[in-house]
Amino acid sequence: MKEALLTLSTPMHWLFLTLVLLAVGSFLNVVITRIPAAVFAELEGCDSPEPIRQLFWPPSRCPGCRASIRWHDNLPVLGWLICQGRCRDCHQRIGWRYPTAELLMAAAGVCIAARFGLTAEGLGLVLLSAWLISLALIDLETRLLPDLLTLSGLWLGLLAACLGLYVSPTEAIAGAAAGYCLLALPNALYRLWRGHDGMGGGDFKLMALLGAWLGPQALPAVILLAAGGGLLQAALLTIAGRLQTGQSIAFGPWLAAAGWFTVVWGYEWSLS
Ligand SMILES: [Zn+2]
């Protein structure tokens, strides 16, 4: 284990860390709402503000009545609970995704801090968690995995390897290429057989992102875990009558979850 930048020694330190992570989760909700909206606006040929700029402006508004959200209703998790998941002005439902993103970010960050401390490795994994949570929730809501996130996450993985974190630069580059091909090649065969894609192109890029962080040797484990989870979900939904023939499930959340567990636990094993 590398030297910690700061030590978390008192309950106050952990409380402060949790609050910071909840605030990061709150910002992820802006990312999850606005990046796919910008992608759809561009697809429809509408003028949309530059994606990075619109992450910071304008301030949060209710999606229903466009009223500005008061600062106390914007507090992570608490604001959603106080308003019982509804807008204070028009009473439109504010989805469960908002507190979920905040709680997932806090849980992932605390888990990483407990295992790796506030080290460069730990901070890198918190950054990766933010990317994966955003991608998983965007895919669940919109069935998109925006390039802005998959490709930037891939570059971050390559950069982390150049800084001597997780895997070597050679493994990171090989992992990114292998990750993309591991899904793109079977999909190309599937398209020849059935005449349509079995997976979206975003899934290949998300797998390339994971390959850049993990190296090629961990990718079979990620695919097996993600495919197992996806098949189980599809089977349960089919039994419940909620998935018809020809419908598909979002695979991105399973890839993100499988990748996260493999990176966090796999990296710990490699240290021991
Ligand atoms: Zn409203």
Image (spheres, grey):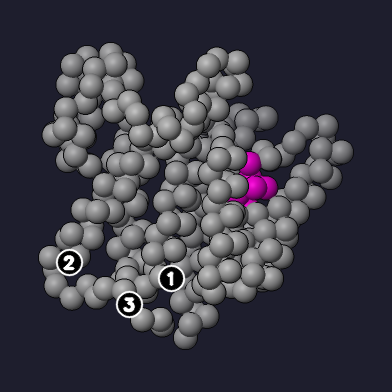
> In terms of sequence position, does the residue under pointer 1 or pointer 2 come before the other?
2
Disc ID at residue 121:
1
Instruction: Give the distance between the C-alpha atoms of the residues marked 1 and 2, in whole angstroms.
Output: 19 Å
Residue 25 in the image: state x and y as whole percent: 32, 46
User: Is the C-beta separation of discs 2 and 3 under 8 Å?
Assistant: no
- In the picture, the quarter occupied by the N terminus is bottom left
Per the image, the residue denoted by label 2 is: 13
Disc ID at residue 5:
none
Residue at 32%, 77% in the rendered image:
4
Q: Quadrant of residue 6?
A: bottom left
Q: Is residue 221 above or below residue 80?
A: below
Per the image, the residue denoted by label 3 is: 4
Instruction: Give the distance between the C-alpha atoms of the residues marked 2 and 3, in whole angstroms.
Output: 14 Å
| Magenta span: chief secondary structure | helix
Mark 2, mark 3: which one is toward the viewer? 3
Name which residue type carries label 2: His
Q: Is residue 89 above or below residue 261?
A: above
Q: Is residue 239 visible?
A: no
Residue 179 in the image: state x and y as whole percent: 68, 57
> In terms of sequence position, does the residue under pointer 1 or pointer 3 come before the other?
3
Residue 253 in the image: state x and y as whole percent: 51, 46
Residue at 73%, 60% in the rendered image:
178
**Would residue 203 be counted in the magenta stretch?**
yes
> In terms of sequence position, does the residue under pointer 2 or pointer 3 come before the other?
3
Q: Quadrant of residue 224?
A: bottom right
**Crowdedness near tag 3: few (<14), some (14–19) or many (≥20) residues, C-alpha within 10 Å:** some
Which range of residues does the magenta coloring cover? 202-207
Residue at 31%, 37% in the rendered image:
98
